[in-house]
Amino acid sequence: MAQKETGAEGVTALAEADAPVFETLVQMTLDTFERSGLDEEAYLLARIAALVAMDASAPSYLLNIGTAAEVGVPLEKIQGTLVAIAPVVGSARVVSAARAIGEAFGLDISTEDQLRQSDRDRP
């Protein structure tokens, strides 16, 4: 079974792949960081916020949150970012992001429907 790459390892794996689309995406990401003028933490938190706003897929979160963890961005700052943007992007996007993040990292995050069902099943 293939090993799952995260963070910078994932970027390296994509860069080494014989895939021009991925190579272009990796280069765009590297160029954007240098041009942003932000430190690594602010840059990654901004990217995570943008992913939430776009309702991104799990692999996008895996790469960006994995990289954030590797550079020492505390989980509390990622959570704080989600709280800060919730009034702007809406709760549905934040819940969707939480599910995608859980999926990316193999976490079991119960949905509201599952929670309601488990409440009904209790005596």
Image: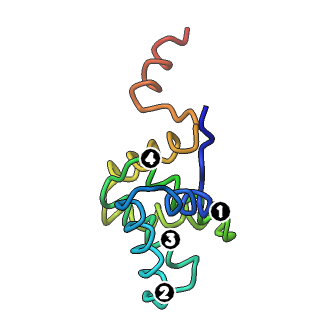
Residue 45's tag is 3
Q: Quadrant of the C terminus?
A: top right
- State the CA–CA distance, disc 3 to disc 1: 11 Å
From the top left corner, tell me how far across and down residue 16 is, in percent.
Answer: 53, 60
Dot 4 corresponds to which residue? Answer: 58
Q: Earlier in the sequence, mark 1 or mark 2?
A: 2
Q: Earlier in the sequence, mark 4 or mark 3?
A: 3
- State the CA–CA distance, disc 1 to disc 4: 16 Å
Dot 1 corresponds to which residue? Answer: 69
**Label 1: few (<14), some or many (≥20) within 10 Å?**
some
- State the CA–CA distance, disc 4 to disc 2: 25 Å
- State the CA–CA distance, disc 4 to disc 3: 16 Å
**Label 4: few (<14), some or many (≥20) within 10 Å?**
some
27, 45: nearer the viewer: 27
From the top left corner, tell me how far across and down residue 72 is, in percent.
Answer: 69, 69
- Secondary structure beneath dot 3 equals helix
Dot 2 corresponds to which residue? Answer: 34
Amino acid marked by disc 3? Leu
Amino acid marked by disc 1? Ala
Picture quadrant where residue 25 is located: bottom left
Is the Cβ of the residue at disc 4 closer than 8 Å to that at disc 2? no
Amino acid marked by disc 2? Glu
Residue at the spot x=48%, y=86% of the render? 34
- Residue at the front extreme, as displayed: 18
6, 20: nearer the viewer: 20
